[in-house]
Image: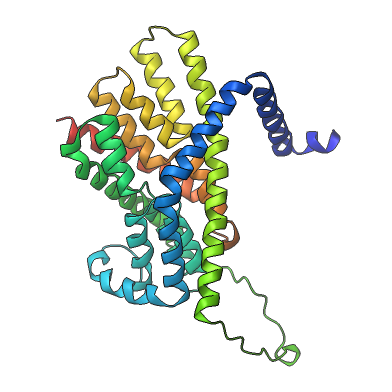
Amino acid sequence: MKNFMKQPRRLFLAILIFSYLLLLFFFSSICIEGARNGLLLWFEQLLPSLLPFLILSGLCVRFGLSEMIGKLFYPLLRFLPISSHGSYPIIIGLLSGYPVGAKTCADMLIEKKLSRKEASFLLCCCNNASPMFLTGFAACSCLGIPEKRYLIFFIIVISGFLSALILYPFFFKNMKEISSNPISHPSKQQPIKAHHVTAMQKLDETILGSFEVMVKIGGYVILFSIPATLLLSLFSYLFVNPSETVLFFTTAILGFLEISTGTSIIGSSCLSLTIKTVLTLSICAFGGLSALAQTKSVIGSSGLSISYYIIAKLLQAVLAGLFGYFLLCF
């Protein structure tokens, strides 16, 4: 117990885990429903939409195709402080969704195709909700404004670029590189034998790595879907006819936990279209704690900082909400 008291972080984590176990015990039926919702979300939406991007993106990096794709799109992205290699994570991030953009940045940093400064900057602007989620689920199904679906996607992308550019002089411009391999004395170095890896071996390794990432994503989605379902049940029990203020904060909290559940609840609420739009854009820009945990899991071995990413996402959420208010509501 003394060790826990000396380390507040471990004590907080222990209390959090124990509280979660109590919720599972006392509210088992609601927790099972939340876990089922998270599992269905992962199996029916995330797995078929993200897995192909993870596999193909990993193959492009392993076979060196990312350099060619990056050079192809680099003329369109010259306004960003990136090299031609940095264009590739942006394109992949635009086409896929959380956390494929972050995984691509981490892979290219590990492969030494991006510097730490460039990968940190790109992480803050290329890891967003997928275009299918934004234009289909958020704009059409939840908000009911299919005529503005591409504008919603444009707002999320532009706010991501702007937040990263605003933070660039403060966090990334003078960032120092960190050498992961200590320099050894030349006389003590042993000759390294070249190990040839076949194309099929690269494919097998990429598929296994992609499934490992998808299993992690599924675990995080389920873990965050359970408290979101519990909060929704508690809200329905406490407030039969909630005021607009109570409804606003409740839906914001749900979206802060899990982006899909929060967006769905916002769309079905009785809030005005203006408030729904601003809330949805802010939540989609931030991604929720679930997407944050997924991002942390895929960049863990690369050494990229999650702190800068969180600050950038919070700023992006504010910018996306402001853009949504002025562009969509007037």
Q: Indicate whether 129 appears above or below 8.
A: below
Q: Is residue 299 visible?
A: no
Work out whether residue 170 or residue 302 is closer to the camera in this orientation and state it: 302
Picture quadrant where residue 60 is located: bottom left
Q: Position of residue 178 (x, y in %)?
A: 58, 68
Q: How is the image coloured?
A: rainbow
Question: How many labels, in total?
Answer: 0
Compared across the picture, whether 257 is left or right of 25 comes to left
Which residue is pictured at 62% across the width and 20% down the height? 27
Q: Position of residue 246 (x, y in %)?
A: 40, 14
Q: Position of residue 61 (x, y in %)?
A: 45, 71
Query: Residue lying furthest top in this view?
Result: 241
Q: Quadrant of the C terminus?
A: top left
Q: Position of residue 213 (x, y in %)?
A: 54, 55
Compared across the picture, whether 322 is left or right of 254 comes to left
Picture quadrant where residue 151 is located: top left
Q: Indicate whether 268 appears above or below 211.
A: above
Q: Is residue 311 visible?
A: yes
Work out whether residue 328 or residue 227 is closer to the camera in this orientation and state it: 227
Which residue is pictured at 50% across the width and 36% down the height? 38
Q: Indicate whether 119 appears above or below 224.
A: below
Q: Quadrant of the N terminus?
A: top right
Which residue is pictured at 46% across the width and 13% down the height? 236
Q: Indicate whether 124 appears above or below 197.
A: above
Work out whether residue 70 or residue 211 is closer to the camera in this orientation and state it: 211
